[in-house]
Image (tube, grey):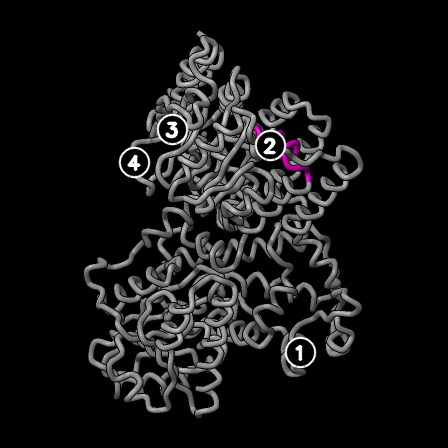
Amino acid sequence: MSTTTELLQHGAELFPGEVVTTAHVRHLDLPLQAGKLALITLDNGFDHTKPTTFGPGSLLKLSAALDQVEAEAAEGRIVGAAITGKPFIFAVGADLKGVELLKEHEDALAIGKGGHEVFKRIAALPVPTFAFYNGAAMGGGVEVGLHATYRTVSSGVPAFSLPEVFLGLVPGWGGCSILPNLIGPSKAIKVIIENSMNQNKQLKGKDVFELGIADAIFEPADFLEQSLLWAAKVLKGDVVVEREEIDRGKAWDDAVAWGRLVADAKVHGAAPAAYKALDIIARVKDADLQAGFDAEDAALADLIMSGELRSGIYAFNLVQRRAKRPVGAPDKSLARPVSKVGVVGAGLMASQLALLFARRLEVPVVLTDIDQARVDKGVGYVHAEIDKLLSKGRIGKDKANRLKGLVSGSLDKAAAFGDADFVIEAVFEEMGVKQTVFADLENVVSPTCVLATNTSSLSVTEMASKLKHPERVVGFHFFNPVAILPLLEIVRGDETDDASLATAFAVSKKLKKTSVLCKDAPAFVVNRILTRFMGEIQGIIDEGTPIADVEKAVEPLGLPMSPIVLLELVGPAIALHVSETLRGAFPERFTVSENLGKVVKAGKRGFYTWVDGQQVLDPEVLELLTFGDTVLTAEQVRARALEAVAQEIGLMLEEGVVAEAQDIDLCMITGAGWPFHLGGITPYLDREGVSERVNGKPFLAPGVASVPA
C-alpha cells in the first residue's frame, strides 16, 4: 500500500460524509488520426447545483483513474490524457466540510500531501496531458489543471479563481508554486492575492485565456470537440504552444513586494494567509516546484489548524448556507405575488431602489416625490444607469429599452400606487414624516399592499401605530450602495403579520439579497453595532488620543476601511442621527459627540480632505474640534472599542434582536464588509477572549468557528 493511499484512506475515515467525486475514464479517437486519448471526467453524480469537490475519497478515485491511464500510457495504448468536468462545472476545489472536521496538525498535513501526490501524477504521466476547463473552476479545481501540460478554457466559464486567501488558506495543491512559474509572479499575485482579497473576485473564461493560464479558448457550444481537435493538432506538431519567458530577476522580487503592499492595505498584517502565499511565491523564484509544494503543505497544515481559517470557513458557510434559509422567515407559501412596485421619494437612495426592483423583479416601478423636478431627476437617474449597463455590454438594447419602460414617475399617488402590491418609502429619516407618508399611502393602496420602510434606525412599530392596518408594515432596510452590499435587514413590527413578512422575504430573494429577520429594536443590527463601535472611537478621539493613533490602533482588526473613513462613507449627518436615536433608547451606553455635531453643522463630509493626491486631516475641521488630554495606548483603544461591541452584541442577543450570534455575523459581513477572516465579529471576540471577559462566556460553541476540541 502506497503512502499516498494510506494518507487518503485515513482522511476518508475522518470524513465519512464526503460526497465523493468519481473520475470516469473513457477513450476517444482524436481527430486528424492523432491517436487515442484517455479522457478523465470529474463527476460527483449530481447536477450543476451541487458542484464537484475534492475530499480524500475523491482524491483516491482520481488516483485510481491515473493508475489506469499511467499503465495505458506505458503500454503505448494512448498518446495523451485529458481531464474535464461534468456539464457547467469543472471542479470547485477542496471540500471545506472535511477541512472543518480536522482536529490534528498531522491530519491537516496529510490532506496537503495527499492532494499534491495525486495531482503530481498528472504531470508525471509519460504522455502529454491536457486540462479542458469546461465550467466553473476554483481552488483545487484550478490547481488540478495547472499540473497538466496544456490547458483550454470555455469562453462561457462564469467563475474561475483561487479563493483560498479570502477564506484564510493558501492555494495548497500547486497554485502558489506553479501559477507564478506559468504566467509570471505579477499576474499570479493578482489572481492569488488581489482578486481573492477583493471579495473573491472571479475571472471569466476570456480572462483565463488572456492571463495565459489557458493556452486556447473555445465557445461553449462545441467546447469539448474543439478542445479535442486542438489537442490533436498539438500532438501532431501542427500547433506549437508558446509562452512568455518569465523574468526571474528583480521583477519577481518587485511583484512579491507589491503583493505585500496589497495585503497590508487589506488586512494590515492581521491575517496570515496572504503573507504565507507570498512567501511561497518568493521561494519558487528559481522554479523549484517541489520546494514550493513542501512549503504549501506546511502552510496549509498551519492555517487549517488556525482560528482564522475556521472563522473563514464559518463565514463562508454563513454566506453560502444560512443566507439561503433565513432563520425565522414565515412559510414562503404565505407570500403574495408582487406585480408592481411603488417607491416614495426620488432621491439617490430611492432611485437606487427603483433601479434594483426594475432589474431584478422586471415589473413596473413608479417613483413619486413632492414636485415634478424631483420625480424627473429620479427617473432620469435610473434611465442613465440602465444606459451605462448597456454601454458596458452587461445588458442588450432590447433589455435596456424594456427596463427603462418599466420605470416611471408620477405626482399622483393614487394613480401611481392604486394597483401596486409593494410600496417602499425612502424619505427623510424623521418619524413624523414617515408616519404622514404611510397615512397617505393607506388611503390609496389596495388592502393587501405591503408597506415597507427603508428606515435605518426608527421604530417600525411606531411608524405603523396610527394606521388602520399596521399589520402590513415591514422594515426593509438596505445598505448603501444598494447594488453592491448584499444585506437586507427585514424588520418585523409588533403588528406585522406573516403574509406581509413572507412577501418581504420573497421580494428580497428575487432581489438577490441576503435577508436577516430582525426584531424592531433601535437601529436593528448593523447600525447599532457600528454606532456603538464608532461612538467609542469618537469618544476616545474627543478625550485626547490623536486621530492617527486611534486609526493605527484598530488596524490589526483588518477592517475594510478605517473608522474615520467609514464615517465619511456613511455621512456624518446620518451617523449623528443614528447616535441620537440610540442615545435616546440607551442613554447609559450611547453618547453623541459634540465634535461630530460641529462637523455636521459646518456641512463637512468628514475629517479628511485630499491635498496633492494624498488624504490628510482637514485643517478646517480640526479648527472646529476640541479635545481633552487623555491619551490611550493602542492596546487600550482596541480593548475599549471591542469590549463595548462585545457588551452590545451580548445585550442584543438577550433582547432577541436576531435569533443567534450567527445572524449578527452574517449581518456584519454582508452589510458592513466586516472581514471574512474574522468570521464577522463574534469568532474574533471569542478568540481574543473579549467575549469571556465582558459577558462571562463565548458567543459560539467550541468548534463552530474554531478547531474542534
Q: Which residues are magenta?
A: 174-185
The tag earlier along the polypeptide, 3 or 4, is: 3
Magenta residue check for 490: no
Q: For the residues labelled 2 and 4, say whether their Cβ atoms are less than 8 Å apart.
A: no
Give the distance between the C-alpha atoms of the residues marked 2 and 1, in whole angstroms: 58 Å
- With 285 as the anchor, is 417 left or right in this view? left
- Lower position in the chain sequence, tag 2 or tag 4: 4
First in residue order: circle 4 vs circle 1: 4
Q: Earlier in the sequence, mark 1 or mark 3?
A: 3
Residue appearing at x 57%, y 35% in the figure: 170
> Do tag 1 and tag 3 residues touch (Cβ < 8 Å)?
no
Q: Residue 106: in sight, yes or no?
A: no
Q: In this picture, is 139 found above or below 366?
A: above
Give the answer, above or below, for where 43 lies relative to 544. Answer: above
Q: Earlier in the sequence, mark 2 or mark 1?
A: 2
> Would you name the residue on which mark 1 appears?
604
Residue 490, numbered circle: none
- Horizontal side, residue 167 vs residue 345: left or right: right
CA distance separating discs 4 and 1: 56 Å
- Give the residue pinned by disc 4: 46
Distance of label 3 from label 4 (alpha carbons): 13 Å
Q: Nearer the viewer, mark 2 or mark 1?
A: 2
Q: Is residue 705 left or right of residue 266?
A: left
Mark 1 or 3: the one toward you: 3
